[in-house]
Image: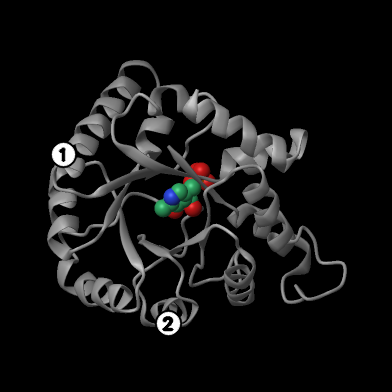
Amino acid sequence: MYLGVNIDHIATLRQARYAGNIDAHNAEPDVIAAAAICERAGAHGITIHLRADRRHIQDEDVFRLRKNLTTKMNLEMGNTPEILEIALRVKPAEVCLVPEHRREVTTEGGLDVAGQFDALKPTVARLQGAGIRASMFIEPAREQIEASHRIGAEMVELHTGAFANATDDAQRAELARIHEASVFANGLGLQVNAGHGINYTNIALIRTVPHLAELNIGHSIVARAIFSGLDAAVREMLAAMNG
Ligand code: PXP
């Protein structure tokens, strides 16, 4: 299983002090340095979300990371013309389309690919026309997987947030949903990724799900890095993922 480290919260910390002045000589922590540490620790990719409100990752970060990454960039974005134009200029290896609401603390729920099919289809086509692989961040539900397949996406990223927030029987039920969704998506020929709320504890259950190609993990790794350092935090997650 591959690991994409989401470094949005490295930028969150920088923005807390240097918003509007990220080029200052003392602006820290540096997202380029953070990405390099993740890559050296074995991460297979770097994931970032350029939000419409620019609350963490900034446009300049995206372009600088694109030049400096030695692995691949997975750019998460809402389906808006402004961000799409940026994605087409940056040309990351992959784009993951996500729902985005201004007041949310973090991405809430999956993208309604079935309901927004006509609005999403041209975006997927333009991304793919530029050589960018497309992923849809969706709830682990058949309807959304079928729609992602019909729209021509190469990948789905199954939203693991409900699983991560549940406990006991409810969590086991969510895990079963993810399991079933992964088998179904794989059967349609989609690459299956997962993300949101995955941490050092629940990874033990997530890794039992078949066909998962890549996990995108951010908050738990960045949180652990405060105590143990980013290199150790990434290595520990990779070990937990792959046993
Ligand atoms: N995948 C997607 C599509 C996301 O939107 C996020 C959160 O930005 C993540 C993965 C990472 O979630 P977390 O920070 O909870 O690990």
Q: Is residue 107 visible?
A: no
Tag 2: residue type? Glu
Viewer-nearest residue: 143 or 228: 228
Q: Quadrant of the N terminus?
A: top left
User: Residue at horizontal 20%, vertical 72%?
Assistant: 121
- Helix, strand or loop status at disc 2: helix
Task: Tell me where residue 170 appears, x and y as whole percent.
Answer: 31, 22
Q: Is residue 79 above or below residue 107?
A: below
**Quick one: label 1, few (<14), some, or many (20+) residues within 10 Å?**
some
Per the rendering, the mark at residue 184 is 1
User: Residue at horizontal 55%, vertical 51%?
Assistant: 6
Kindly identify which residue carries mark 2. Answer: 82
- Helix, strand or loop status at disc 1: helix
Q: Is residue 182 left or right of residue 33?
A: left
Viewer-nearest residue: 116 or 211: 211
User: Residue at horizontal 41%, vertical 80%?
Assistant: 88
Task: Tell me where residue 38 appears, x and y as whole percent.
Answer: 64, 48
Question: Which is in the foreground here, disc 2 or disc 1?
Answer: 1
Task: Tell me where residue 171 appears, x and y as whole percent.
Answer: 34, 23
Q: Alpha-carbon distance for marks 2 and 1?
A: 33 Å
**Quick one: label 2, few (<14), some, or many (20+) residues within 10 Å?**
few
Task: Tell me where residue 145 appears, x and y as whole percent.
Answer: 18, 49
Q: Cβ(mark 2) to ligand 1 < 8 Å?
A: no
Q: Quadrant of residue 181?
A: top left
Tag 1: residue type? Phe
Q: Is residue 25 left or right of residue 121?
A: right
Query: Which residue appears farthest toward the top when viewing the image?
Result: 168
Find out whether the residues at labels 2 and 1 contact each other: C-beta distance under 8 Å. Answer: no
